[in-house]
Image: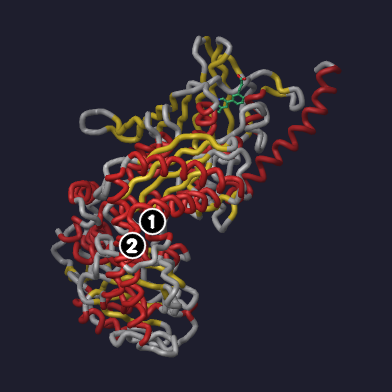
Amino acid sequence: MSEELNTQNTGYSADSIQVLEGLEAVRKRPAMYIGDISVKGLHHLVYEVVDNSIDEALAGYCNHIEVSINEDNSITVVDNGRGIPVDMHEKEHKSALEVVLTVLHAGGKFDKGSYKVSGGLHGVGVSCVNALSTYLRAEVRRQGHIYMQEYSCGKPLHDVEIIGDTDETGTSVTFKPDGSIFTDTVYQYEILQNRLRELAYLNKGITISFTDRREKREDGSFRSEIFHSDDGVKEFVRFLNQANTSLINDVIYLNTEKNGIPIECAIMYNTGYRENLHSYVNNINTIEGGTHEAGFRTALTRVLKKYAEETCGKAIEKAKVEISGEDFREGLIAVISVKVAEPQFEGQTKTKLGNNEVSGAVNQAVGEALTFYLEEHPKEAKVIVDKVILAATARIAARKARESVQRKSPLGGGTLPGKLADCSSRNPEECEIFLVEGDSAGGTAKQGRSRLTQAILPLRGKILNVEKAMWHKAFESDEVNNIIEALGVQFGVDSEDDSKKANISKLRYHKIIIMTDADVDGSHIDTLIMTLFYRYMPEIIEAGHLYIANPPLYLCSKGNVKEYCYTDEARQEFIQKYGDGNEAGIHTQRYKGLGEMNSEQLWETTMNPETRILKQVTINDATNVDYTFSMLMGEDVGPRREFIEQNATYANVDA
Ligand code: 0RA
């Protein structure tokens, strides 16, 4: 080795130690960089890589992105952008490509001119993906050549090589997530599908193709689809509203820029009773809201209120109602997408926009577009205003219904429903309540429970489908009121407060466990109860308090050996293990319902905290959950049937 190279090497290795430390930190504390190491984090890796391609597209250099799940659960993302630069990076003494892939946060370093508007929630860059992959291969088409470099756990396996010539440009990244870091390394088609579809709507004009190469279909093809939207969030809101009945056929749409902030927004009204606002900042779903949502709501209230008073003042007077902000949002479904150069993310999940300047910009943009629409469309405007007046009337009816319930307990402590068998502990942290299908199973559960910490609330049959009912109807339903009262959840505590937000500060149990039969009816009841929680008390799900019990399907026995089986597979295993695959000597008791178990069996299998299996209910993808619930529980039967056919996991339970 020459003297000169050696000197260079000293500087080089000092740098490279720093670089290695950087990526070692990612491997040591992956959750700090990508959120978590479970399914979410695993899919997050794909978003990190795709985000870079989206940035390239937003800068105007790329219009096609191809995402594949490969046979071995590795991922390939290909784009037709300019390609990551490959020339020598002066400071780091290595190719720019290697720097981008091995230095933390190196992503935006080169391109100060165009601001990075995309960028995942954690915005950590593709080097993190590299650090968390056992293998990564980057291919760059640029300057007439195909450049290639491979890495393992973030370390280059060799220098950048030229492996061919090309007249195309673009970047291709293939990576295989490290199974020693992630708890799960199997990609889920639906999760990626939802995000890629969303990205296509949020960035109109880009084509994103998606292929799952793990399994061939009967006709020999792979599952594959292409996402592309010319109309952006205007199409997105129609997609989200698919399962609802539109109040007016139009989408109120705007695509503009205010004070240097690009704003795209689409608004529809449906005949439902919920507000359904999906907001995005730099392609990130801001589920906690923030200043852009505040600006939107202010504009909506301001403009609609003014219009209603000017055109329908008499009708409002006649109805004797005071219209409040939320009345304007009943049946509203909207998507708002803003791009902010330096977003401040706040809140528990860092999905709440804090930038104050955004509020005024959105307020102005939405205000202008809405005013224009109402002026141009008086017929539609009247339909909207009529619905608003109806919403105000219903809200006041709900307040009266609630007041009459709350008056029963003048001290405000809340009454407890007569059917509740409460536990004796008053420490919510150790208390659980079982919402049990049917009085007979409820009775068994009462006998079998641990009285100190377990409460039982039997429910009669199917509770109200709140997805189809006006908001106040829930408070007129006995079963729903029983649940709300037993839990100690409060809505609009003082009579002036009509807020739809649930106050869970006095929640009496930290585990709320839905316990139903393991059959089609049971799963329907599960869904109805989950819908109630999701629509009226999402705070409970978000805090991780809602669970579903998992009763066994069978008690299998052979001689003295007895085993509860929770799935058909478990039963087959039992037959394999104790009967050598022969069912003849094996006795199977099939539990058609909870009621068939005695209290001891129910305790042992479904209620005993040490041996039971609980499934926690979580909200993974708010956009999609919203859509799924309106589809499953709403008016339109078509998409529901399709969904049930595709997800018919319960079918075999009844066989
Ligand atoms: C830095 C600078 C330039 C492009 C890129 C990064 C880039 C990164 C990725 C990641 C995936 N696809 C990508 N495409 C481009 C611009 C370099 C120039 O001026 O040509």
Can residue 299 be seen in the rendering of this structure? yes
Q: Can you say which quadrant of the picture contains the C terminus?
A: bottom left
Residue at 39% from the left image edge and 77% from the top image edge:
487
- Real-space Cα separation, disc 2 to disc 1, in angstroms: 8 Å
**Image mark for residue 581:** none
* Quadrant of residue 457 within the rendered picture: bottom left
Marks 2 and 1, the one that precedes in the sequence: 1
Is 450 situated left or right of 179 in this image?
A: left
Label 1 crowd (10 A; few <14 / some 14-19 / many >=20): some
Using the image, determine if residue 215 lies above or below residue 138.
below
* Element under disc 1: helix
Query: Residue 49 in the image: x percent, y percent?
Result: 52, 34
* Quadrant of residue 111 within the rendered picture: top right
Using the image, determine if residue 10 lies above or below residue 330.
above
Tag 1 residue = 309
Looking at the image, how many numbered discs can be counted on the residues?
A: 2
Residue at 26% from the left image edge and 75% from the top image edge:
477
> Amino acid type of disc 1?
Glu
Q: Can you say which quadrant of the picture contains the N terminus?
A: top right
Tag 2 residue = 316
* Element under disc 2: helix
Front position in the image: 409 or 315: 315
Is 320 situated left or right of 18 in this image?
A: left
Query: Residue 390 in the image: x percent, y percent?
Result: 29, 62
Is 230 situated left or right of 585 in this image?
A: right
> Amino acid type of disc 2?
Ile
Using the image, determine if residue 140 lies above or below residue 337.
above
Using the image, determine if residue 585 lies above or below residue 444.
above
